Image (cartoon, rainbow, N blue to C red):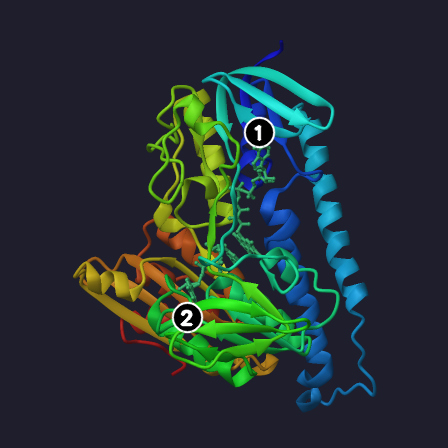
Amino acid sequence: MVKFDLVIIGAGPGGYVAAIRASQLGKKVAIIEKEKQLGGTCLRVGCIPSKALLESSRLYEQATEGMKDRGISFSKVQLDLEAMMQHKTGVVDTLAGGIDGLMKKNKVQQFSGHGRLVGNHTVVIDSSGGEETIEAANILLATGSVPTSLPGIEIDGEHVGSSTEALKYGETPKHLVVIGGGVIGLELGTVWRRLGSTVTVLEYLDRILPGIDSEIAKDALKIFKKQGLKFQLKTKVTGVKTNRKTVDVLIEGKDPVRCDKVLMAVGRRPNTSNLGLKEAGVKVDTKGFVTVDAHYKTSAAGIFAIGDLTGGAMLAHKAEEEGIACVEQLFSGYGHVNYNAIPAVVYTEPEIASVGKTEDELKATKTEYKTGKFPYMANGRARASGHLEGKVKILAHAKTDRVLGVHIIGANAGELIAECVAAIEFGASSEDIARTCHAHPTLSETIKEAALAVGKRTIHL
Ligand code: FAD
Ligand code: NAD
């Protein structure tokens, strides 16, 4: 039996990145993945295919109606959904092949099959070819998450689907009901609205995008409504009744909503299915997430866990950072993730991006803060390119001026946030950003102006 320094179960962004880093540190590494392609939820049925469809659907919408005011019109715009889906699949296949190549280049031994713990240092791999047992000094669990549903509602993949189905509908649903006004609901709701569906979002809370700064979420709701997404907030879905071709979504105290597809987007749960956690003595919390300490150690000696499996923000880049920190801590004695400097991006139109504390959090902790805001409509580049909706909001400590949080809604917010992440990582003040020269004309000037606004000396407003 071959003995590895590290065996990783799950080749998502957490697992495969950890494998590369461990190999760079000179360790003998194996990775086990049950799906045919490496890359995890993110690459196969998450970040990448959703962004491919968001970009393609944006182009379609722009071609059909978005360019008339610029003097560009097309006589006939046609949607070839099959070709759009093929493009998406091509992107995924290429990137999955790339990860395969990275594993080979880094001499990470790949095992195809379902990994299961049978002790602190032993994993059994079940595959169509039978069972194989491998041993390791250390085991890293990176099995990610899977979609969850509501009690009494089965994700049948036909009438009621998760994001996985909504990434590959064969035709545009006439009426798509999205249960859950979170990130998945709004990103995929946007895709199908652009491609011609009527989209109704049913959200349990009185707001959308929980976790996002509430002022920014309010702005987003207004913009999404204007784009044609329909919302029912404070809405408790109690069940679904499927008919031959339609579905009735049942709501407490309200009329049912009839549609032809339901996208269940109420969150994801840890993927611990047949992982052998109990047998190995790995503890989980009340929601089933594997509990870890600051060094990603589980309750079982020699077994570590990272990424979606351990809870917190379910983000690919967070899983990657944890994978690297875990492996560096284990093999070199030092590894760390600054959870305050993990950006979050919602790839709707406009994009929403944030880092650090929200205003709601600062209020709740009675932190004294100053606010600086700058609207996109006062930025030259935004005006020239027609991206007038949005704003940048910077929250800085009232006394030290240290940047505590940045929240952006607007075009390219997902790219603009990188500067703000670096600012928080380096402990910058709002004055540091305000005194940094930003190229003109760029959208990044909105960040400089918002930083100037913290000190009440914005120039272009
Ligand atoms: P995963 O990516 O879930 O990978 C776990 C892997 O383990 C999977 O490949 C699984 O097959 C494998 N596995 C599980 N159990 C076993 C086993 N017993 N044996 C062998 N293999 C096993 N995040 C972002 O940051 N940006 C985005 O834009 C974004 N968009 C998203 C869009 C959608 C529609 C969804 C669903 C998610 C999105 N996410 C996004 C979230 C992101 O995909 C996850 O946070 C990320 O994939 C978590 O990485 P992970 O490595 O922890 O787990
Ligand atoms: P989410 O937690 O973002 O949103 C779920 C939404 O469903 C919430 O608004 C919640 O209030 C609502 N909800 C819960 N129960 C409900 C009920 N009974 N009826 C109606 N609404 C209900 O979860 P998600 O959108 O499913 O996404 C799952 C994870 O994937 C998230 O943690 C997210 O971070 C990650 N993800 C990230 C990105 C990105 O980074 N761009 C994109 C997609 C997914």
The amino acid type found where label 1 is placed reads: Ala
Question: How packed is label 2: few (under 14 Cα within 10 Å), some, or many (20 or more)?
Answer: many
Q: Earlier in the sequence, mark 1 or mark 2?
A: 1
The amino acid type found where label 2 is placed reads: Ile
Q: Quadrant of residue 55?
A: bottom right
Q: Residue at x 71, y 35 (%)?
A: 100
Q: Is residue 262 left or right of residue 392?
A: right
Q: Residue at x 18, y 63 (%)?
A: 368
Above or below, 111 relative to 374: above
Q: Which mark is residue 208?
A: 2
Question: Of residues 137 and 347, which is closer to you in this image?
Answer: 137
Q: Residue at x 35, y 77 (%)?
A: 458
Residue 124 visible, this orientation: yes
Residue 132, position as x, y percentages in the image: 65, 18
Residue 176, position as x, y percentages in the image: 60, 73
Q: Is residue 421 left or right of residue 167?
A: left
Above or below, 456 relative to 341: below
Q: Residue at x 32, y 50 (%)?
A: 427
Residue tagged 1: 19
Residue 347 visible, this orientation: no
Q: Which mark is residue 76?
A: none
